[in-house]
Image (cartoon, grey):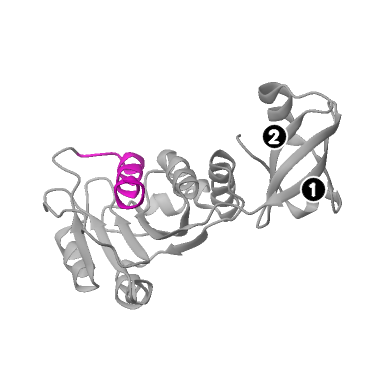
Amino acid sequence: MNLVLLEAEDLVAPQHARLAGRRLAHVREVHRAGMGDELSVGLLGGRMGRGRVVRLDEEALELALDLDQDPPPKLPLTLVIAVPRPKVLNRVVAAAASLGARRIVLLNAWKVEKAYWASPRMQPANLRQQMILGLEQAKDTVLPELCLARLFRPFVEDELPRLLSGGTGLFGHPGTGGPVPPALALPVTLALGPEGGWIDAEVQSLGQAGLLPLDLGPRILRTETALGALVGRLFLA
């Protein structure tokens, strides 16, 4: 936790917060903070700054707040990610939030098992918690917009063109040889397929919607690895 992320209900006064539970345990056991120490803090959806410890015991952490900084800007990026296996989902969603994506779309695809959608990890509360963990890691306070697209064709045919309007659309697909475009019109929409990749019909549909194929080379990467590699190549090179 590089940022103690506060929510509105944590505020007991405009410049005073009281925390318990996971964040209290982390500050005591990992930060090993003491009275008078200062921590990096931020208000979810708001500003960032410092929090001075004015109480710390087994029951609560109280902080005097000085929030004087804006959070880092979001990347002009929509990530469209075919729903991964449940045990991978948490890592992917947290990583997408930490990278600064403005929007995350979890999409159905032919090779996405139906059981994935029924997993408790697909519940809104869990997805929100994973995005919060990503924000804490990256020192950000603004949640990405999160969308669930259970039907591939209606999303690709109806929603995807709207997201692409005026920008660049790309989809990861091994074996295409597609390079990163030399210049990107913003915003960027990047689609990552399921384990095993997109099927031919999906590749055709994504291309018809205006997405260009993008290839990272001969190695087949895990979703979270491909995510970091592609975002780094597009925005951080």
As helix, strand or loop, the secondary structure at mark 1 comes to helix
Per the rendering, the mark at residue 22 is 2
Residue 68 rendering spot, x and y as whole percentages: 72, 51
**Mark 1 burial class by Cα count in 10 Å: few <14, some 14-19, many 20+:** some
Q: Observer-nearest residue: 139 or 171?
A: 139
Q: Residue at x 68, y 29 (%)?
A: 26
The answer to whether residue 60 is seen in the rendering is no
> Label 1 sits on what residue type?
Asp
The answer to whether residue 7 is left or right of residue 161 is right
Residue 131 left/right relative to 24: left
Q: Secondary structure at mark 2?
A: helix
Q: Residue at x 44, y 49 (%)?
A: 96
Q: Which disc number belongs to residue 10?
A: 1
Give the Cα distance between marks 2 and 1: 13 Å
Range of magenta residues: 220-237
Q: Is residue 59 above or below residue 234?
A: above
